Image: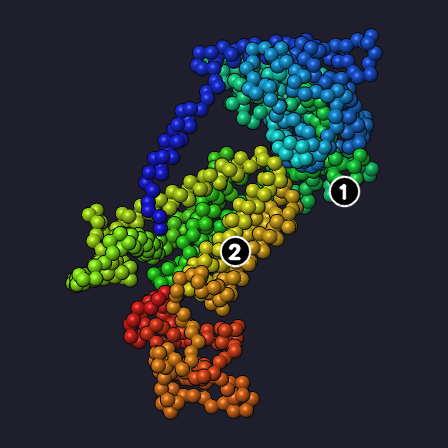
Amino acid sequence: MRPPQDNARAIFLIILIFWLATSPDSGPGLIAGPALVKNRIARQREALGVLNGTQWGDFTPRLVDDPPETEIKYLNLTGFREEDGYVWEDLQRFKNRCEEWSTNAVGIPEAAQPVWQNATGVVHGSWQRLNASLPRYHSSYNLSAISPGVSWAGSNSDWGRNVTGPEGKIMVRIEDNEDDETEPEKIDKLVLDKAEIKARQVAGTVNIDDIEGTGSSWEMRLHGVHWPRQGAILLTTTSEKFAGIFGLPHLTARPDFFQTSQALLNRSLDRALEKKEQHTFPNPVEPWSSSLDAPSEAWNPSPHCEYLLYIQIHPLDQDILGVQPSLTGPENVAKAIQDIENELRFPQGTGHRTIPRLQMSAVLFSPDCGFFLETKGPPAFAPADGMHLVGVKQEIFLYSVSHFLLGLAAIIFGQLQLLKMQMRETSTPSTLGRVSFYTCCMMLLADGMLFTGAAAWSFSASTTLLPSLAITCVSLLSMTIETFFLAEIHKVQEPEWRRQERERERQNASMNTTTTTTTTNTTNPPNPRQPPTITTTTTTPIIIPSDQDIDAEIAENETNATLPAPATAGTTTPTAQNLRTQLSNTFGGLLFLGICILFLSLAAASWRPSIRAAYFNTLLFGYLSLWAPQIYRNVHRNCRRALSWQFVIGQSILRLLPIAYFYIVPNNFAFAEPDWTAFSVLAGWLWIQIWILAAQSVLGPRFGVPKGWMPEAWEYHPVLREDNIEAGGLPIGLVSTPSSPTSLERVRTGEEGRKQRNTNTHVIDCAICREILEVPVIKAGSDDPTAGGMSGVLARRAYMVTPCRHIFHSACLEGWMRFRLQCPICREELPPL
């Protein structure tokens, strides 16, 4: 056991303070900050005036195939000016693609099929990349001219969110809150219903995985407008170099979309700016910012590609919906959809047996980086290649998350019950000494990280608050009991660690002494005429301590009898304070390791998908190696079994179940793709460890392990031979003659006798159970070819021989040694199993 490292915490604290003190402060300060925010608000007011004073057709940039005499119009908005150099030549191409997406999904606008009126949900799918008409690079723009007065971070380097691969994956999370701004603003429920809402403000979070390109995963926030009746959504990013939300109505494909979105945004943006103008120190973070790390992007933003996202919601599956529009009309279909949405939002117990899935198609256009991203699906692609964007409504998604969290809480509770059962079986020092300290540390580390994640989730959870609190409470209880169990194991095994440490120090001291003696003899050869000097050594009395570390203390006293003790030498017996210090250092190390793994896992979300998958597979492989320390402990102590099979198998299954959910369930809430190969490797490695533990229990912990690899240990199942009588190798009671009443040699005849001609079977009474014990003994001068094989190993498992040469049933002596490491007959100390 390593010595306590009390200075590690202080060093870590100093490094943390130094890092915080030397971190660059990119903010403008308390004086200049409000002035910069007010200037930004003034620019946004001017942009809102441009939006309010324009009409349909005022933004008609030049197209690729337009003749020179074509009339072109641009807007006085950042990114919408001709001199900014954005690829607006493909704007009409983007609008045409949006109309094709809508026509393929719901039909022509005059006879569009009913769709979901509320688009809140999570969808995912695959995309393909198409180049724009003209290429654009980050060197094609002058950011100082596009957005004067803005200090850009890394303007000369490659822009973020730049997708370069031919295809990848995308996930979209739509937040279509019905309490947001709508057009018209106020609805008379006596005249109009929710279906008459023309437009509603909406936001979405998009995650793009550029698997074959940069290998990065880009996450951004977009804001825009949803037209519920048509099922169309138009979202845009907004930054200092692109006033996307202020020019969004001019990016629509229909005049009615322009009118409703212009009226809606004029009102909502004006209220947002008024709210910011009323504060003396306004918040620098914009409500329509596209960066999720908005505080750091407020003062020194990093340039990135801007996006326009058009989404078309698809009609519901008629077979699941149970309403045919050709028979009942589209009005009844819309009514059935509205009933489902009302039941999802306000459950009344009248829901459908199966909720139809949420399906969308999308097209993204980057006007500054010059490319398109289109979801893969019919009619351009076969259904096997993709179905555009497929997912579930937000209510169904949260329902799945809640069920998973409740199941996880039940799994942790099951692990807790197994742990309590195991603690009842390992309640003595003898049984606690068999359990691996590091196996319990791995369990405590995993449950601690789960507790930390559940507690952090509970702070921001609303719908899943109760399930997350259940996980937090159960994992906290499990951590508490595991900490107590780990402390008991540490208290029992700490003398063993000190004994090993003293043995290493003694070996190092003997090596140094040998080297010094050799050097002295070489320098000063002995004088043959000088008579030898006889030194009398007084033996130091041996005092048996109370910590059960008897052998180490005896060896230490014998060493101190010949070697002078240093002046600073003190007692080696640990005090309660030292034990608490060592245990607190262990827990501190586990806490630091858990924090590092949590932060590394959060950072892995932005890594290349292949590297991210390799990281999590490696992390889970290490987590599921929890029985490897116990296997090593069994071999090191020559212990056949330390943990009950209910605990080993139960913990293995329960800890594998949450992993199996993400690896083999196709529609999991994280949208992780099934990976049967990786799961087979993880599960196979876990079961290999269980089979090794089973082999150690049946064949012995050191079966197949070379003798020189591990320290010598007493073999409780030796091969007994009659020619070992003089060496004292046979147990007491087996050396008597066959006519003795306590020993009987069975005489075998026929086929059985021919098979056993090399072995005699002695019979003796077990001193614990007082039952007959049959012991096979090899005759003198004979060899048993099966002694070293499987059959010989299994035959020797019936008896156990102590160092004091007493023999018992294996089950009897193992049960005795669970409570006392003394011979039941002579009270001699027994080596632990």
- Determine the residue positioned at 64% across, 31% down: 214
| Residue 420 spot, x, y in % from top left | 42, 57
| Up-down relation of residue 774 to residue 552 (above or below) | below
Q: Nearer the viewer, residue 363 or 265?
A: 363
List the residue tagged with mark 1.
Answer: 384
Are the residues tagged 2 and 1 within 8 Å (C-beta)?
no
| Up-down relation of residue 720 to residue 474 (above or below) | below
* Crowd class of label 2 (few under 14; some 14 to 19; many from 20; radius 10 Å): some
- Determine the residue positioned at 52% across, 91% down: 749
| Up-down relation of residue 497 to residue 129 (above or below) | below
- Looking at the image, can residue 103 be seen? yes
For residue 16, which quarter of the picture? top left
For residue 86, which quarter of the picture? top right
| Residue 803 spot, x, y in % from top left | 34, 72
Instruction: Choose the circle earlier in sequence order: 2 or 1.
Output: 1
List the residue tagged with mark 2.
Answer: 652
- Looking at the image, can residue 420 be seen? no
- Determine the residue positioned at 53% across, 35% down: 603
Q: Nearer the viewer, residue 658 or 158?
A: 158
Q: Give the alpha-carbon distance from disc 2 to disc 1, as whole Å.
A: 37 Å
Q: Quadrant of the C terminus?
A: bottom left
Name the element at disc 1: loop
- Determine the residue positioned at 34% across, 78% down: 728
| Residue 626 spot, x, y in % from top left | 48, 53
For residue 641, which quarter of the picture? bottom left
Looking at this rendering, what residue extends furthest in the front direction?
A: 529
Q: Amino acid at mark 2?
A: Ser
Q: Amino acid at mark 1?
A: Ala
Name the element at disc 2: helix
